[in-house]
Amino acid sequence: MALPPFATAADLAAVTQSDISAEAAELALASASAVIRRWTRQTITRVVDDVVTLRVLTEQELVLPQRPVVSVSQVRVNSLVLQDWVLSGDRLLRTGGWRRLPGTTTYPDPGLVEVTYTHGWVDVPDDVRAVCLDLAAMSVTNPSGLRSVAIDDYSRTFAAETLGSGTLSDSHREILRDYRRRIGTVGLR
């Protein structure tokens, strides 16, 4: 499934204050969005009825990988649809734990839990859109990654930050840090 970019070609043209071909703008925005998604490990945009299969690691909770979690429509264990779970933020909780099958007092290992849920933002957060536009603008304004260019009496020098377009700077990472998927209380680097 192809996910939409975090900004539009019109947004990119406005930021760069230049005419950019639709193909170049769409490629730059799709690439910038992919870089952000890869680093954050999040789709960020709304995905409805996404199906994820999770292995039970702790008895009491399952952590859904994409945030924000909007709703959960189905939870299945060993082909049984469960009704006795509660959604708390991005976690599914179950009285008696995830190893207990419904209607029993036994706790066989369920192996995998299949969850169908909706996650992500309807509107891309402004700071994510800003990073996307910054990365895309670097790609379209300096596609060759030149430090400077001179023709006759005209010269242009690019800032060091625009070199190596398509990569997140430290300030980009700082802006996106809150969107990055975490494991437990430790953030991944």
Image (cartoon, helix red, strand yellow):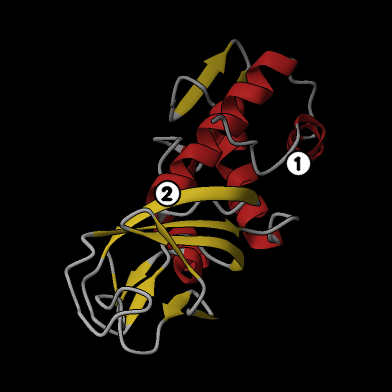
Residue at image coords 66%, 44%: 6
Quadrant in the rendering for residue 94: bottom left
Quadrant in the rendering for residue 173: bottom left
Closest to the observer: 88 or 109? 109
Q: Earlier in the sequence, mark 1 or mark 2?
A: 1
Residue at image coords 31%, 73%: 101
Determine the residue located farthest toward the bottom in the rendered image: 95
The crowd level at tag 1 (other Cα within 10 Å; few <14, some 14-19, many 20+) is some
Side of 98 relative to 170 (left or right): left
Rendered position, 179 above or below 140: below
Q: Is residue 169 visible?
A: no
Closest to the observer: 175 or 143? 175
Q: Position of residue 65 (x, y in %)?
A: 41, 61
Q: Secondary structure at mark 1?
A: helix
Rendered position, 46 above or below 93: above
Residue at image coords 43%, 30%: 147
Which image quarter is the N terminus in? top right
Mark 1 lies on residue: 15
Mark 2 lies on residue: 168
Q: Which is closer to the viewer, label 1 or label 2?
A: 2
